[in-house]
Amino acid sequence: MEVLVPFSTDRPKSRLSAVLTPDERTAFSRAMLRDVLDAIGEAGEEPRVLATGAVDADLPCPVTVDDRPLTDAVNAALDARLGEGDTVADRVAVVMADLALATPDALRELFAAGREAEVAIAPGRGGGTNAFVAGHPEFETDYHGTSYLDHRRIADGIGASVAVVDSHRLATDVDEPADLAEVLIHAEADDDGGDGDDGDDDDDDGDYDGDGGRAPRWLRDAGFALETTGGRVGVERE
C-alpha cells in the first residue's frame, strides 16, 4: 500500500515558535518526518512524501512536490490513485508527518482496518484527522475545521463503510509546545521497557529504532527535558 505523508517545507511548525527558532523548527520537523517514514516502512508499507516544496534532506522514499493547500494536494493524489486509469490502486493511506509517537504496530492497526473497510480513520485530538486509509474512489478530504467529523460525513454521503482507529499514538500530533512532553514521555517509557536503541545517535540507516527515534533525540540534544510543575508534566530547556 502506498502511504502519502504530507509535509510542509514553508514555515514548518509555526506554533512551536515560542520555544524553537525557525531553523530549529525545520530540523525538528525533519526528524519527525524521518520517524514517521521509518515506522511506515517497518510496518511493511511504501511511504511517499507529499511536500509543498523541495525537501532538503536525504529521505528513504520518493518525494512528490505539490504546493497547493493540503486538502487540494491530497485530493489530487487520491484521485490519481483511486480514480479511473491504468494504475488504479486498491487502497491509499495518508499519514501526517508530525505523528512523532507513531509506531509500526499502531500503523499496522490502521492499515489492517483500511483493508477491511472502505475508509479507515485515525482521528486526532481536537477533531482533526491524523491518518486514514481510503479505498472508495469517491472519497475526498476536507482538512478545514473538525475534519474528522467532515470525513465521517463524506464517507457516509458516498455510502462507504468506515472503521475508526482509536489510537493515542496516532491521535497525538505535535503542534504546540505542550506536545513536546508527550514525545519525551513516550520515548522514556519505551526506553524503560527495553525497546530503545543501543545509544548510538548516528542512526541514519532508516530503520525504526523503537524509542521514538530521531524526534526525542533531537529534543534531548537541544536541551529539552521533562519538568513536573504543580502536578502537571511539561518541558524545560537547559
Image (spheres, rainbow, N blue to C red):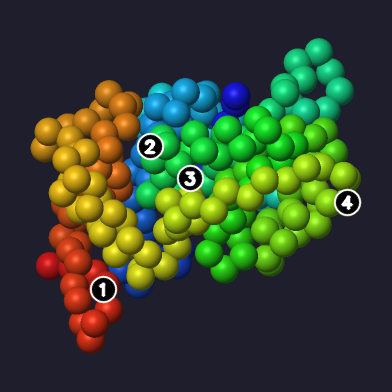
Under mark 1, the amino acid is Val
Q: Residues within 10 Å of mark 2 (few under 14, many from 20)?
A: many
The CA distance from mark 2 to mark 1 is: 26 Å
**Secondary element at image label 3:** loop
Task: Say which amino acid is labelled 4.
Answer: Gly
Other-residue count near label 1 (Cα within 10 Å), few / some / many at <14 / 14–19 / ≥20 = some
Which label's residue is closer to the chain start, 2 or 1? 2
Q: What numbered label is drawn on residue 97?
A: 3
SS at mark 2 in the image = helix
Residue found at x 32% / y 32%: 208
Q: Amino acid at mark 2?
A: Arg
Disc 3/disc 1 C-alpha distance (Å): 24 Å
Q: Which mark is residue 157?
A: 4
Left-right relation of 48 to 214:
right
Frontmost of labels 3 and 1 is 1
Vertical placement of 105 versus 174: above or below? Answer: above
Distance (Cα) linking label 2 and label 4: 35 Å
Identify the disc placed on residue 34: 2
Q: Is residue 55 visible?
A: no
Question: In the rendering, which numbered label is found on residue 233?
Answer: 1
Nearer mark to the viewer, of 2 and 4? 4
- Relative to 126, 71 lies left or right: right
| Quadrant where the image shows the N terminus | top right
Q: Position of residue 47 (x, y in %)?
A: 52, 28
- CA distance for labels 1 and 4: 42 Å
